[in-house]
Amino acid sequence: MAARSMKEPVCLIESDSKGRLCMVPSALDILLQIEQKVVVVSVVGMYRTGKSYLMNKLAGANKGFPLGCTVQSKTKGIWMWCVPHPRKTDHTLVLLDTEGLGDVKKGDTKNDNWIFAMAVLLSSTLVYNSMGTIDNKSMENLHYVTELTKNIKIKSNEKDDDRTIVQYLPSFVWTVRDFFLLLEIDGKPCTENEYLEDGLKEIQGEGNQHYNEPRACLRKFFLPRHCFVFERPAKAKILQRMEEATDADLEPEFVEQTNKFTDHIYTKSDTKYVGDGIKVTGKLLGQLAETYVKAIRSGEVPCLENAVVALAEVENAKAVEQARVLYVQRMTSVRFPTNTLEELSAIHASSEKDALVLFMKRSFRDDKQEYMKKLLIVLKGAYNQICEKNINESMKACEQIIKGVFEPLENNLGAGLYSVLGGYKMFRQNREEMTDTYRRAEGKGVKAEEVLKIYLDKKVVVGKAILAADKGLSEAQRREEAEKVKWEKAERERQAMELKQKALEVDMAQQKRTQQEHIKQLNAKMAIDKKDADDRHKKMMADFKEQADKADKREKLRLEEQKQALVLQRQLDEQRIKGEWWESKKSKSRS
């Protein structure tokens, strides 16, 4: 299904009558039909903070996710909107708008924890939306981040360390709405990202754990981090009809800030990955969401590794079947019977290669190559059936040709035309001429000589009888002709053995080619996976280094300013002391 057919958002995950999360089947079906890779952007935040407006802008629309103009929370559960990605032609942009956190009407905060956990698990980029400033209150509202390690598990059989967790979590964007302060730190201008990093600083000393914990978790788990601040978009009357407002109705600064935010998401948000660099399609995303919700409903903590393993089993089995179907389709180009074994083997090799390429593209996490081995066994079985059909078709074609070519010989035998003086010579001459005619005939296939051998071997007894009855031959001539018959039969046996040996060699060459193609495709997939993993690691490290360099630069600048301030203060103190000493000296001289 193309993302373009989705005209408006739909609810993907809702709460049932008992307050438990559940999938909406119709929305899940939409995801399961998307074969493109996805970039997934989720927005979370306190209710009535304008989250839905940002998601609508990312979808290139004013209307879509409900905005509302009251103090009531509009979005319930998790809503989804799939649209074509504006910058990546082979990707679908999946926007997830979550239920507002902290809605007092819900009472049970457990639901908020699971909504936040689901947003983190499904996202490429997590957007946290807040109002006013980045202060202690906004940090306390983000306390869900401190529960992540309780509500999300990466590995199934071992304890997750911080380095393991950060590799699988989305990038983080903090959007601050109705921002009214100057972007300054210690009186000096700063960037939005520097403003965020300054807000994440911890307070040293005991008794500050409650203050430091959400800040430490954000720094520890989410890389890279970015911040965007937005001024108040418009006056109150316009805010009450934001779905109808155009950019001309809004403050120019707000429009510019919104465009800056959307451009960042379009260009910086990565393809969704899970596990060891597995690129997620819409179909896989739907299956992941379903797996996570099932775990939560059963009282378990959703585990990424378990979900990936379960998905791999299902998808790899499907990949085997899809590859088999493609192979069978490719092999329909065979015209039975083929003239040679090599001709059939070449078509098989090409078809098998296409099947392997498809399997490698669709499969993942086949670490022990179990499904690859299953595929090779399936393809071998299919090829054997085709070879058997090729043999049968060749046998039928050859028998039909022999029947037509040797029909005059059979008629002569039935009429007793060879039971005369010189009859054996005539029999032998007719047989050789018809044998040459048979060999020149087309469409016999791979069993041409074998079927001919069977026919000629049956005529050996007949030939001997004609030879014995021909009174025109001397005893010496009969013995000579008998030896020729033995030699010809032995020659046909030798040729038959050669053909069997050749068939064996073709089969062995095919097996070797299959193994080489298997290794080639496997190496190619490993190279691609390694490159993707290296690129993602380099990007993550580059983002980390960029933020660390900026923080380091900011810290060096702060220390330099402190140093200059101390120097200035020292100079002022020295001038003051000198001034006091001079005044004291003048006072003494007057007295």
Image (cartoon, rainbow, N blue to C red):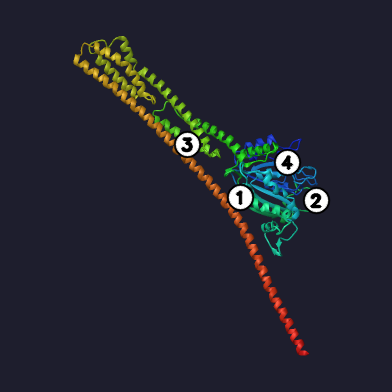
Of circles 3 and 4, the one toward us is 4
**In front: 318, or 304?**
304
Measured as percent of width and height from the top left, residue 93 is found at 64, 44
Name the residue tied to disc 1.
Answer: 163
Q: Is residue 490 visible?
A: yes
Quarter holding the N terminus? top right
* Residue at x 56% of width, y 33% of height: 317
Name the residue tied to disc 4.
Answer: 77
Sequence-first disc among 1 and 2: 1
The reply to whether dot 1 and dot 2 touch (C-beta < 8 Å) is no
Real-space CA distance between mark 1 and mark 3, rounded to the nearest whole angstrom: 39 Å
The dot on residue 238 is none
The quarter of the displayed image where residue 474 is located: top left
* Relative to 462, 372 lies left or right: right
Of circles 2 and 3, the one toward us is 3
Query: Which amino acid type is marked by label 1?
Result: Arg
Residue 326 in the image: above or below residue 175: above
Q: Is residue 59 visible?
A: no
Secondary structure under tag 3 reads helix
The reply to whether dot 3 and dot 4 touch (C-beta < 8 Å) is no
Name the residue tied to disc 2.
Answer: 237
Quarter holding the C terminus? bottom right
Sequence-first disc among 3 and 4: 4
**In front: 242, or 265?**
265
Query: Which amino acid type is marked by label 2?
Result: Lys
Residue 79 in the image: above or below residue 381: below
Query: Which amino acid type is marked by label 4?
Result: Gly
Sequence-first disc among 4 and 1: 4
Real-space CA distance between mark 3 and mark 4, rounded to the nearest whole angstrom: 45 Å
Residue 345 in the image: above or below residue 148: above
Residue 454 in the image: above or below residue 285: above
